[in-house]
Image (cartoon, coloured by chain):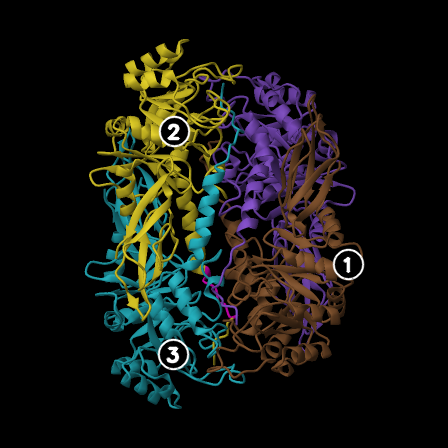
Chain colours: A purple, B brown, C cyan, D yellow
């Protein structure tokens, strides 16, 4: 008379039909991940990676692979940036600095990826490695003098990005330093962005430089192999991305936004950038609900985080929770003592706005 | 001079800080899953499960567990429905038909779950098992005559739901049948909903009954153990849910919507319901983008599915893809031949609107 | 003429057949996890958890759930240890200290789990909480005086285990201390084991006590809800287990081994115990292969870790790798400089043999 | 006085130490997966993949990638088999049929992978595509006449493998056929193996051919991109592998075993091969325990499957379970009615020994 727990009659028909269709569907088409990150008022948020390699320098994949990866990862724009000065496969692949661009271009159109023509100018420190983005012809950048090569890049309209400025192979203490050549480039307006995140490294002082000289804060993968084998992983929740706040999703708007420094660096659940972008971005990610219940001691309410980024709130006011995790794409239930001293101010541990400074926010219901 | 792939300097400080905070955060608060399902114009979509058991009948968990599970799974409302006539643990737990309700009520308030007072009236077929929902006192339903028990439930204002009408232990061929007693209940207006999905079973003819008599199509877990050990699993993407389209998120609006039959049954990537609800629901889940590229042969565009439900489109028009999977929470890229005969009409294999009928939709960019 | 990457003809028939069978199989039978941990010469390694609760004290599940969980998790023996002095559900469930044992016994036989009759004697610190294991009748332990209750337990032949001795609710600084009552118990031979791991806590000084007085080092879950919702998780790789080295897989041999102190505490990739057990256990987990290749500078060889426990080797000798992770159930490839000073001695960071002491091992090919 | 469920004091120190070490370890060394498959008496079971591509024909990765993938996947031997007649990247990469071999050789030595020199002779059907394995110089195989090319391969000592014989682009009905040229090759002893599994396709008639002419049954990935992006996946549990039963783990023993036809094709939880290999292989995978319990009606015992392959047993004798799944690397608990007619014979649905024939086994405790 009664249903027994272990009884199971299976939805056989239903399940098999779904599977068949799923298979058919899976292989005819492609899926692009939805990256849940909000736009800012007046801007669309473009997800970009401006640093990666292929078999045309020291990478191990064919250029079209980079486009397919970007599509799957939900990116809007990428640049393939093979080294000008380092082509270790030249015994088997003749040097051709524009090859990757030419090969990847059609795929990019078909996959709705904005492909930025780029290259990595690969020098000792100083000045270290520098990416030239939005160029016309990489082969013209094969010149000896550092000064000449940047001049040529600028002539082509390039955005110049200083790569991994604290890379220990070039800067043994890991701390980026502005050498004379960097200062000169900045004076001339020839340096436009610096990598805060490169692969799984980060360089806190970059925030200081970018704030001082209004440069774009960048985050890129510098990937050499298959990106899916690096991110996401047990240790890294997502690939590094430069978030660019552009007037629209076009190559020109992207370029304008980068030159204007409207970016946030995003990697492994961390945001790093200027407060003017990072603050409104945070408040667009979360929404605080009205209290749904209270008892003698506590008020109960929920905070919805609709973004892919968890936020780690710390240093709460007295009697309030000292730390709160607003999990990504989830609703966090808060039980706040009526004795807490309002307003509910927190430091957001994983949102960096300066070398030693994190974003301060308020939870206001 | 050049970056080597295998080089890795670790983000030690950053990572450890995040972990510490994460831990602190994880245990002080609770997270509610975001179930990505759209509202309908004029209605909020409430995610509900109106059938589950505890140690007070033949379940194996304490009533508060059901509230915590519902919270974690992102539900809005649940009913605990222990059997009136089957209490196999009575040697250890004295029979108390209202105990689960009393125990769970405070937890429900604190977790923002609407707890519906319910019970399962557990009879041989016909009429089989019937849930009485929105009751006042379950102990008054411990009466011998089936007719009397439904009368008492109705007197209390109950919504009466016929459970697993094709359960093979009671209906050996698995096909639900309207016996005289069911017809009488319907005539009197005493039957308000029928389970299309119960646990991992489904009963196609329920759609016919519900359409004919304007009853609510229901999907419930009928869970006895820990729900997390059943759903999601390798085989089932989510627990069964009754989606209720209510004017607002209140107990009264929920009840009104159910009596009005404004529901969809949802389980394991399947939707089953009346076309009037299912059709607008589908179109609120997806959005078709403008073509972003074309070449001589094809048009390229993207379809965004912002819901947790993948849609399996089949039976495409000539020269169009014959089947398309619109993966949940992803963007599907479509390449359509210019020779395809428009409009692009598809059957949605996993959206059922009748016993042998699936939803027909158009992809219109 | 050539195979194109995107071509996919599906193994439809094969896949569907497998799925159907898989379903049929899944629900008729049950699977027990294989826990990959080696035996020691002359002993079998029994995986045990001697601390957990049910609805008969402050747990939230029915006793049979504990047996099913143990079966799925691959355990050999468990004890359900509801509190004698704390029965918060007594308004609904009459106090019955032997109920959980009686209810779980048959299930244990059917699932090949050795069920140890136990209870938790729940007192303020000192002496704190104490589990009595291998008892005959828990109801006789409902006595006021602490001295009397231990005497009665010992009269029944109990193994007495001191639970979470550094639990901060009872011992604010988190550091276990031997109070007079503990010393007396030890003198009388009435204390047989101490929890090093309890739930996700650990107490380093327990190793000192256990070495000094030859007590068993214990690790238990102290679980109250569904164990699957706690372990494994993002943070904990497995549930706490006491590994007992018994002459054979019988209740008597288990009891003998525990009284003899032949145990290792195992939790979250950590082992803690006396060196006499931990050292041979480590060497049974791994095997070092012969060098398969060498070049001018390096020797190449592989280390196989056939256990579920990763080993974190640190403090390598000069010119050898400073740290090595021997991943669980994988083969680790080592490239060792010919200039390294042999023997290759390492500290195993996650194998604790004393309060501040880890196991030292040699990799010898 | 009592432990509360929600209390959590964290193992902070412990966890952080582990993480730091884990990181250090992860990046200095490499891990090889343990593939749990038994040896046969007198033979070691070598896990092999003899069909894959690189940028030197129509693949998209550099040759060393294939070695690293094989290492991670736990393989013993691979062959890179770029097309002789199809080199679509020749505008950027000059044709060099031995390049992949030369590039991958050192990496293979360092990673303990046996690299077999191979190539794919790429012709219309008949004869279709054919891999020449264990060759000396692929460039000598660039000859027009099919007859000449096989003669040259044989002159170099090649093992000739017929690839995807039912590939629909060449054989529209998907069913492999022995054309005259194949028969001639067989007569001359110039055909040594046929792919039963290629990528996610399979060809049942291959078993008939291999049994009739004593050829090796092969399973290969025919991979073009990153293998980690194809296997394992939601749909495929592992990459295709040819299991070769060799006298020892050396290149010569491998070659001997292949010419002797001592292989099983393994893919996606399926085994296909000659009964003489498949039958002892099955019995080495499982062990049936003694009954540990019985009641009036049933006998209880456990079957341990120590391999990575689940076995789907069907068509049980009367009163015994009709189907049983012996999950991979788990222990299956069986409850058998005392009324079952012994012996317990089953068909193993996923172990194929002929076109329409599966292995029959007995569960004997």
Q: In the rendered image, which residue does mark 3 sit on?
A: C102
Residue D103, position as x, y percentages in the image: 39, 23
Q: Total of numbered circles in the picture?
A: 3
Residue tagged by mark 2? D195
Q: Secondary structure at mark 1?
A: loop
- Helix or strand or loop: what does disc 3 sit on? helix
Q: Identify whether B145 is placed above or below A249.
A: below
The C terminus of chain D - image quarter: bottom left
Q: Which chain contains the residue that carries disc 2?
A: D
Q: Nearer the viewer, mark 1 or mark 2?
A: 2
Q: Which residues are magenta?
A: D6-12
Residue A87, x across and y down, in percent: 49, 21
Q: Residue at x 28, y 16 (%)?
A: D188
Q: Nearer the viewer, residue D84 or A203?
A: D84
Front-most of residues A345 and B156: B156
Mark 3 to mark 2 CA distance (whole Å): 58 Å
Return the x and y of residue C318 as percentages of the image width and height.
Answer: 30, 42
Residue at figure coordinates x 55%, y 39% from the top left: A23
In the picture of the structure, the residue carrying the numbered disc 1 is: B43
Q: Residues within 10 Å of mark 1 (few under 14, many from 20)?
A: some
Residue B124 among those drawn in magenta: no
Eyeballing the image, is D55 above or below B164? above
Quarter of the image holding residue A333? Answer: bottom right
Give the numbered dot on residue C267: none
In space, the residues marked 1 and 3 are separated at their CA atoms by 51 Å
């Amino acid at each position: 008379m009664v249903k027994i727990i272990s009884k199971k009659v299976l939805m056989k028909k239903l399940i098999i039909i779904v599977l068949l269709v799923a298979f058919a569907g899976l292989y005819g088409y492609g899926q692009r991940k939805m990256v849940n990150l909000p736009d800012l008022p007046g801007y669309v948020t473009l997800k970009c990676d401006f640093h990666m390699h292929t078999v045309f320098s020291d990478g191990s994949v064919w250029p079209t692979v980079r486009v397919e990866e970007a599509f799957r990862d939900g990116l809007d724009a990428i640049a393939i940036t093979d080294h000008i000065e380092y082509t270790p496969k030249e015994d088997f692949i003749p040097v051709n600095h524009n090859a990757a661009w030419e090969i990847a271009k059609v795929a990019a159109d078909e996959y709705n990826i904005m492909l930025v023509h780029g290259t990595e100018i690969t020098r000792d420190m100083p000045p270290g490695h520098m990416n030239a983005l939005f160029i016309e012809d990489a082969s013209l950048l094969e010149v000896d003098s550092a000064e000449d090569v940047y001049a040529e890049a600028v002539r082509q309209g390039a955005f110049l990005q200083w790569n991994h400025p604290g890379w220990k192979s070039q800067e043994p203490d890991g701390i980026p330093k502005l050498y004379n050549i960097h200062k000169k480039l900045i004076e001339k307006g020839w340096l436009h962005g610096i990598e805060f995140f490169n692969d799984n490294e980060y360089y806190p002082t970059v925030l200081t430089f970018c704030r001082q000289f209004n440069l774009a804060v960048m985050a890129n993968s510098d990937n050499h192999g298959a990106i899916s084998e690096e991110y996401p992983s047990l240790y890294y929740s997502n690939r590094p991305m430069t978030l660019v706040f552009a007037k629209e999703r076009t190559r020109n708007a992207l370029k304008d936004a980068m030159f204007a420094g409207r970016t946030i660096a995003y990697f492994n659940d961390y945001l790093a950038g200027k407060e003017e972008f990072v603050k409104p971005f945070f408040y667009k990610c979360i929404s605080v609900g009205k209290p749904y219940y209270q008892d003698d001691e506590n008020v109960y309410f929920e905070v919805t985080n609709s973004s892919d980024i968890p936020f780690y709130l710390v240093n709460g006011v007295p009697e309030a929770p000292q730390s709160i995790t607003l999990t990504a794409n989830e609703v966090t239930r808060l039980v706040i003592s009526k004795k807490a001293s309002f307003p509910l101010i927190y430091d957001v541990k994983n949102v960096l706005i300066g070398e030693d400074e994190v974003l301060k926010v308020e939870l206001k219901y």
